[in-house]
Image: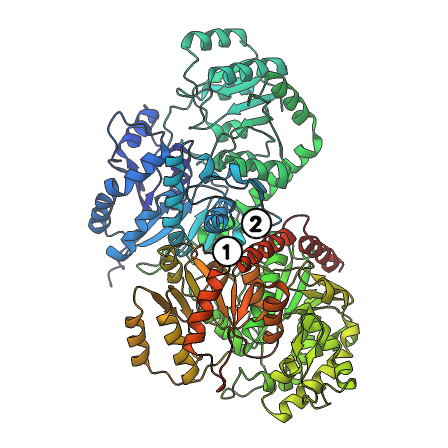
Amino acid sequence: MAAPPPPRPQPHVMVLPFPAQGHVMPLMELSHRLVGLGFEVEFVHTDFNRDRVINAMANETGAIPDGIHMVSFPDGMDPAGDRANIAKLGDGLPAAMLGGIEEMIRSEGIRWVIADVSMAWVTELAATVGVHVALFSTYSAAVVAHRLQVPKLIQDGVLDEIGNVRRNEMIQLRPTMPPVLAVELPWVTLSGTPDGRRMVIQNVFKTNPTISSAEVIICNTFQDIEPGALALVPNVLPVGPLEAPATSRLAGHFWLEDTTCLAWLDEQDACSVVYVAFGSFTVFDMARVQELADGLVLSGRPFLWVIRQNFTNGAGEGWLEEFRHRVSGKGMIVGWAPQQSVLSHPSIACFVSHCGWNSTMEGLRHGVPFLCWPYFADQYCNQSYICNVWGTGVKLQADERGVVTKEEIKNKVEQLVDDKEIKARAAKWKHAACTSIAEGGSSHENLLNLEYHGESKLPRLFNEVDATSYIDNSKKTTSMAAATQPHVMVLPFPAQGHVIPLMELSHRLADQGFKIDFVNTEFNHDRVLKALAEKGAIPGGIRMLSIPDGLDPADDHTDIGKLVQVLPAAMLSPLEKMIRSEKIKWVIVDVSMSWALELATTMGVHIALFSTYSAAIFALRMNLPKLIEDGILDETGNVKKHEMVQLMPPIDAAEIPWVSLGSTQERRRYNIQNVFKTNRLMALAEMIICNTFREIESEALELLSNALPVGPLLAPASGPTGHFLPEDMTCLTWLDTQAPGSVIYVAFGSSTIFDVAQFHELANGLAVSDQPFLWVVRPNFTNGIQEDWFNEYKDRIKGKGLVISWAPQQRVLSHPAIACFMSHCGWNSTMEGVLHGVPFLCWPYFSDQFCNQSYICNVWKTGIKLCRDKQGVVTQEEIKNKAVQLLEDKEIKERAVTLKTTARASIQEGGSSHQNFLELVNLLREQ
């Protein structure tokens, strides 16, 4: 009889929290869950905190399950050091702990480390010992998204480079995210000194690239409460709300829990008790403690108040005993509470809280309304979620002296307890939270995806791709029932500059609860999936589908003219089948796919056209018959009169898109005929969505009926999911090493092609310029350059320039190191440069790019034009001289900054594009 196979080895994981109570607890909760799934966990404390945890456990048994091993290392501080000084503590941890952690990983053969985001320095070990690192956020996804935006906030002048607030404005990254004042950002409030803030901001800059490129970011949150923020965080896996195990006490508390309060709660009436707890860091002076104490007495309600040992330095034991005697029978004071057991108790009416994320999640999970009293760090952001987004609490207001008075406490308790709508919303979110962690819920499924795959992967971030005629690559969405979720199809033209803005719009709609069927051609679908590689950037609401494009496998699938001719016959019938089977009522169609407008009559669907060009180009398109009537063009697209077409902006007749797009007489004729044919279908569109904003194209927009400008569209921070090439994120680290306003960014989009002579002029012009540069050279940018030449050129510019194949462009343009943008002036690039206030060096290639150059140079005056010589070449001298001219032109820089401010205002709450987007959402919901 064959021997039974040996038991499968138990997967072994190290868990590394930042040494603070609010960081240790959720990671211990996660560790309990992992042990329940068969993992063995090495839980790493500092020596100081391990002793506190052991002391707090006292005589408890069974608090640590067999699978969790409590280990510790020194924290680098003297025994008498102030470990409440977070900045100082965090600064010394890498040097103190890294060596010991590395040795343990090697000796134990550990393949995965789950590290607190605040301990992201441990990712260095990925290279040195080959370990995989999953980051864990003890904050909301919104705070992680804000963290990734810090460089942009500095570039925009909201913060300076050492963390001081220069412009105190309201910041809201997405409509479903919390608005928060600049002075309340975590990195501002974490420290009260300039040195402390500088240290915090420098740490953010240092670790942001690590967070952006993490294999997975585990979050103690769930999809339904943070859809907008989760879309902005790369490789995110929400698994919350995390809970303490029901069968045992949690072995992570720094203080002994006083469980006698539960018996006291049993004696109170249902929904009568005010629970008051301010976490592990909040410190009150004696005046505030007295106001709070008197306010609780004045409220007339029973209360349970947690006063830990270092909550205030001014209240002696005598005061505390006197107050206990005063409130005897009405209130109870404990040193530390079993908070989740308290919040789940039926006697609790509301929660007076500092709004730490753990407390926020626990209150939400148990349906308890909040009285918000934040102290520092992320707590103001969490208060905004509670009061402004979820509507489950009210804010306690300080008076002109900065004191929350006893009257304010009394009044707000009464207001909150009497507010039935807040209670109803709290109950609704409790249900959503419970659903997310129940079997089949979004967080439950995500936790199961933390399955062990030996030495390759801990998280399973992707569903398998189904290789059928059209492919569903979506993640499971549990945010709302499929029957009520509005369903929209999005159809881009199969080119990079068309796919990306429609994917950006799709992300925005998914944040609003829409289910999106995003239809690529099969050829481009495969390119997108390959470019995604290990990013996992598709949000839950977007399904990636594909249809053949009608070309043979060996054909050139980037030949725009040929694609335009074959797409209708290849795609119409499959689109009809999809629309019927999914009962889709709305299709958002790229204007270059306007043949699909026929579906409005054949299928009865509503169609919104989307313009990937400026409103000016759309207006010019509709005026093409008049240009022919006026004798500027003939009916085959040839230029009869070389003159400036005085629309907005002025453009030479030879540079009209349908002329410059046609390299042959036959192509130009087809382009013009296609415009005539599809112009007649435009009346079938119910609206024209434009990636622009009213303030920069007011004249052009007036010429269009039913135009809805919603731009500038933004890429989600997690990375857009429509790229045909993988983005090289290493350029962001390189940019971090450059001086502010020093780097020339050079990128020519996805279709521009340079011959060898022009390529060499550009390469030499950049090399002889006095500025560092970042140059995007995609694989098919030029065909005549050998690999040896490229390697030699990279050596030549080493230390001064960086050449990559594809860039995360919006993140590059938002980087403070960027001085200007040498661009082909595609409309997406134009909008992105405008949004980020970057001056342009204009070098258009074809199509609408000459019109966009005219906007930049003649109308907005935020850039200058690179001119060709008599041979039609832009020389290296021209490149060098124009770069110098642009960087020295203060007026252009000022106009770029002004336009940036206008662009940002348009997409913020109340702005023209923001209002138009909300109008679009309402129209699409009418199904």
Using the image as rendered, state which of residue 110 and residue 406 is in the foreground. 406
Where 520 sits versus 308, above or below? Answer: below
Q: Quadrant of residue 369?
A: top right
Q: Secondary structure at mark 2?
A: loop
Viewport quadrant of the N terminus: bottom left
> What is the x, y in percent for residue 78?
24, 29
* Residue assigned mark 1: 717
* Residue assigned mark 2: 173
Using the image as rendered, state which of residue 449 and residue 890 is in the foreground. 890
Q: Is residue 463 visible?
A: no
Q: Secondary structure at mark 1?
A: loop
Using the image as rendered, state which of residue 677 and residue 55 is in the foreground. 677
Q: CA distance from mark 1 to mark 2?
A: 10 Å
| Residue type at tag 2 | Leu
Q: Quadrant of residue 491?
A: bottom right
Where 249 sits versus 168, above or below? Answer: above
